Amino acid sequence: MADEINTTDVAAVAPEGAAGTDAPQNRSPRGGRGRGAPGGGAGGRDNRGGRDNRGGRDNRRGGPDDGGEELIEKLVHINRVSKTVKGGKRFGFAALVVVGDGKGRVGFGHGKAREVPEAISKATAAAKKAMIRVPLRDGRTLHHDGLGHFGAGLVTVRSAPPGTGIIAGGPMRAVFEALGVADVVTKSTGTSNPYNMIRATFEALREQVSPKSVAQRRGKKIADLLGLGGSKTAEADAAAIVE
């Protein structure tokens, strides 16, 4: 009789075990662990916001910086640094890049990386995001003289007549070439550090204003600002000013 009882118990337990084994398989389509299967929640997470999607957003942010224009890129300076560690030395590179469109917009940036090309690409991306617009007279020179100061850097920029060329050296020349200035006279009386020279030059360029903007701010005519009254020469000069 004991054998019959054991047989009955085993027969009763076996279907329950089988049912317990099938239960997770039946629950998986309703939201159990089966979401890890193909087409489940994991795939949904990849489609909702994987790294590829984040990269696409970065590309969209980088698009308006270029504006569909061909930019002038000038590599100003590359600095190599080394760090002594237990196994030897680790080298790194820092790049300073100036970017401009040759039509009155210019920017600078610096980037650091273990390799030179990567450092240059980082600096170029930073320069494109920090571009400023500088008003130019006749599209070739500055409207007025300017003075820029940053740290130990002190630079002077002056407008020049046609045919003068770019009288500048080192990092300052790269800035004016990318800006699109054809005639300018500059002088650096401070440090020769390219970073401070570039920043001082940009401080001088940010102070540039055009007669048109000053006339609009003061509510006057451009001819009155030129100091020639209502003469025809002043009116002709005022009409020739675009920026």
Image (spheres, helix red, strand yellow):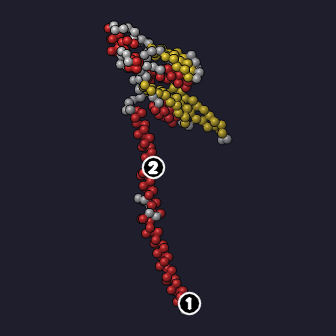
- Disc 1 marks which amino acid? Ala
Write down the quadrant of residue 38 in the picture.
Answer: bottom left
Judged from the image, the secondary structure of the residue bearing numbered disc 1 is: helix
Q: Is disc 1 surrounded by few (<14), some (14 to 19) or many (20+) residues within 10 Å?
A: few
Image quadrant in which the N terminus is located: bottom right
Residue where numbered disc 2 is placed: 50
Image location (x, y in percent) of residue 240: 34, 15
Is 37 placed above or below 232 here?
below
Q: Residue furthest right?
A: 86
Judged from the image, the secondary structure of the residue bearing numbered disc 2 is: loop
Is 207 placed above or below 228 here?
below
Residue where numbered disc 1 is placed: 2
Q: Residue furthest front?
A: 219
Q: Which mark, residue 131?
A: none
Image location (x, y in percent) of residue 219: 38, 18
> How many labels were placed on the picture?
2
Nearer the observer, 133 or 22: 133
